[in-house]
Image: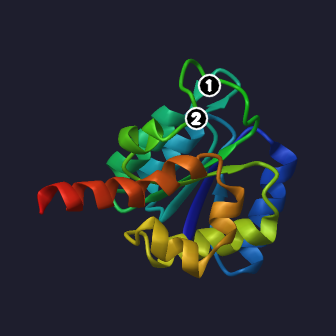
Amino acid sequence: MRILIWHGDLETVACWQTAFGVAGHAVRRAMSAEAALEYLRAEPFDMLLFDLTVGRESGLAVALMAEFHCPDIVSLLIVGEPQRQHNEVIVDSTLFARLASLRCVLGVGTPVRDLVTIAEEISCAPKADCAEIRQSAPQICENCHIQSACDRIPEQSKRRHVSAA
């Protein structure tokens, strides 16, 4: 798997880069939004690990451009400070509507081994629904910052099914 990492926690990013490399994945680390965009223009990537802001730069803009340059890319948002608002973008379920490639929102404190497992599981089945992913890699839900929104999806599906009958 080819992974691009754009995140402000440099010490943690170095740990991620090492862990993914040891697991046999090719990893690029961008130090700025412009560097991330240059990588995206030049190389195909399977996955983007990013935060919503790094310094004053927008991670959402980088993730949207990643979708444009690499249509099959999968994105994992790794939030540096879970209680913070990122330039008026609140970390909640609406991000999934804004960013089609987004599969998971995790905290920066997610253990590295779990992050690698989650990323590998998501990349193997990027179109799987939450229930399938929850069964195959429960670490995803344990560390997810918007689990309550995901938990409501089956309820909404049942209501739609009942009302259609």
Q: Is residue 139 above or below residue 11?
A: below
Q: Is residue 137 left or right of residue 113?
A: left
Report how far apart the C-alphas of labels 1 and 2 lie in the structure: 8 Å
For the residue pair 138 and 162, the one nearer the viewer reads as 162
Secondary-structure class at tag 1: loop
For the residue pair 147 and 17, the one nearer the viewer reads as 147
Q: Is residue 1 visible?
A: no
Whether residues under marks 1 and 2 lie with C-beta atoms below 8 angstroms apart, the answer is yes
Report the residue marked by disc 1: 86
- Where residue 21 appears, as percent x and y from the top left, is 73, 73
User: Tag 2: residue type?
Assistant: Val
Count of all numbered marks drawn on residues in the image: 2
Q: Earlier in the sequence, mark 1 or mark 2?
A: 1
Residue 59, located in which quarter of the rendered image?
top right
Q: Is residue 88 above or below residue 158?
A: above
- Where residue 55 appears, as percent x and y from the top left, is 71, 25
User: Tag 1: residue type?
Assistant: His
Report the residue marked by disc 2: 91
- Quadrant location, the N terminus: bottom right
